[in-house]
Amino acid sequence: MTLLVLGAVGAMVFVLPFVGLLVRAPWSALPELLTDDIAADALRLSLISSLASTAVAAILGLPLAWVLARVEFPGRGLARGLVLLPLVLPPVVGGTALLFALGRRGLVGEPLADVTGLVLPFSTLGVIVATTFVSMPFLVITVEGALRNLDGRHEDAAETLGASPWRVLWRVTLPMIRPSIVAGLALTWARALGEFGATITFAGNLQDRTQTLPLAIFVGLESDRDAAIAMSLVMIAIALIVIMALRRRWWQEL
Amino acid sequence: MGASHGLDARVVVRRDGFDLDVLVTAPAGVTTALVGPNGAGKSTVIDALAGLVPLVGGHVRLGDRLLADPVAGIDVPPADRSIGVVFQDGLLFGHLSVLDNVGFGPRSRGASRAAAGATAREWLDRLGASTLASRLPGELSGGQTQRVALARALAAHPDLLLLDEPLASVDVTGRAALRRTIADHLEGFDGPRILVTHDPTEAFLLADLVHVIEDGRLTQVGTPDEIRLHPRTRYAADLAGINLLKGNATGGLVDVDGHDVHIADTAVTGQVLLAIHPTAIALHEQHPAGSPRNTWSTTIARVEDLGERVRVLLAEPLPLTVEVTRGAVDALGLEPGRPVWPAIKATEIRVTPNEPG
């Protein structure tokens, strides 16, 4: 009985905030609110930056996961820990770290700006860097885990059939861990979409350039509550879709 | 016999404290069985020949190609060995259709999609599995899986064919048909073929030569008949269904763990192996009259139904297997725990000197 009560209270912790939001939602004004300049810019920017960082995560994160799972090297345990760091760290700390590494006066940022003229802070590129930093670990740990649990015998079989290492990777290894790759990419994308702390710290909050949806919501709470609620509803809808998709593809296969 | 294309290997592998050192010679056009108890290292031999497990010593030579020689620093990767393997559970690629699985080898060696597909169809046809072409491996039975696995291995045109317990994961009903299919295709494959099994019937039905491997060592090599008639170890004797006892002979009497067994040959002395065929042992209700030299009192430990015949296992002091007719079982009321008097004529006991090594 006690457990039931505690469980119910636990459920309320999750449910109540959404109820509050839904009750206050300006349903009839939603179309206007979401097509408003600020909201539309934020939505567009969020889609671009989250998709771009998912792409970067795929290009860099998949090889990283493979190296961490398959290549033995000294300090591998440490490297695995470092990959987990952005997951545990407050994003604002991540953003600060990025600022000192890639900012205009940063360790890498200064020579980068001198040579290429590329300045990451206050640019959309900076948003992508920040969201990638925060979200890529989801892909890396999901795929690395899948690779480590993969029964290598199928890869052995492919080799005996004359397959080159690349062919084994593309035709056997990756297809076999496809559910994990899909799940990792979905989680990465969802995390990138929701990114707030690192983005605002590293890339700032400029409409049309670095103001993503979460940032616009935060600002909206001060200036235009209805718009903030409308944009929040969009985020909730996206989150629900991701969860539904993952339930089918990933949770059942685990 | 085309010995120039045969396999000549000494497989020395050490892993997880397991120490394997086995000579494997397999002429072309001949099926060589590797038999042995579970954990003897048979599958490791297969993996080492295929290049999936590194040798720490010895060599692998296939025809005039030296594939592995750790001392000389030679270790040809599995993809370049041209050794086809039919793995224990088939190891088909679950995300590819049966056709693409079989076409995987040709495709890997540079065949176009169409050509690989044609080759795959041809092999599926030969193995009577063409109706499965568009299925996914997850939809196949154990027997179908192994057929496709065999087609996949053969479609890559290997120089050596390795089969690792191909019937182990197939249910009893499908086994006979699959065994016949395998036998037919082994006949048609002109390179050496090596079959790993722990099932004696499989070895004796499919193989021309048998290597017995126990605890990482080769304990006997011979034709199935040689091993059946002159088993060198307890395992080899069990393989052939023959009772094998180790003992010390002096003047026609053999001491087997403190129990005396009479043999016909009075000249042999020292360590011997006694081979007693299960049908050469008679069972009686009471001390038998007449002159069987070997008879004693014991009980029945287990009764196994083989259909028309029944296999009876005796309890201490001599744990022998006796094969009797169903009629005898009914007449004597043979069941576990029942006291019996086994009798063996001394002339029915085959004696082989068991020199160590």
Image (tube, coloured by chain):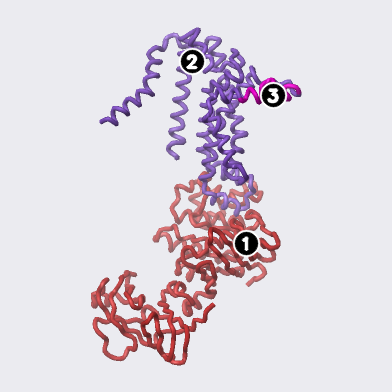
Chain colours: A purple, B red
Front one among A165 and B130: A165
Crowding at dot 3, Cα within 10 Å, few <14 / some 14-19 / many 20+, comes out as many
Q: Are marks 1 and 2 on the same chain?
A: no
Residue at image x 38%, y 88%?
B262
Q: In the rendered image, which residue does mark 3 sit on? A: A109
Q: Residue at x 31, y 26 (%)?
A: A8
Who's the residue at 54% across and 20% down the image?
Answer: A196
**Rendered location of residue A143, percent (x, y):** 54, 38
Chain of the residue where label 3 is placed in the rendered structure: A
**Chain identifier of the residue bearing label 2 in the image:** A
Assign the C terminus of chain B to one quadrant of the image.
Answer: bottom right
- Position of residue A195 relative to residue B86, above or below, is above
Q: Is residue A39 magenta?
A: no
Q: Position of residue B67 (x, y in %)?
A: 66, 61
Q: Which residues are magenta?
A: A97-114
Whether marks 3 and 1 lie on the same chain = no
Q: Is residue B34 visible?
A: yes
Q: Which residue is identified by label 1?
A: B56
| Chain of residue at mark 1 | B
Image quarter in which the N terminus of chain B is found: bottom right
Of pointers 3 and 2, the one earlier in the residue sequence:
3
On the rendered structure, is B320 left or right of B220? left
On screen, A183 above or below B58? above
Tell me where residue B257 appears, x and y as whole percent: 39, 80
Identify which amino acid the numbered label 2 is placed on: Met
Q: Which mark identifies residue A231?
A: 2
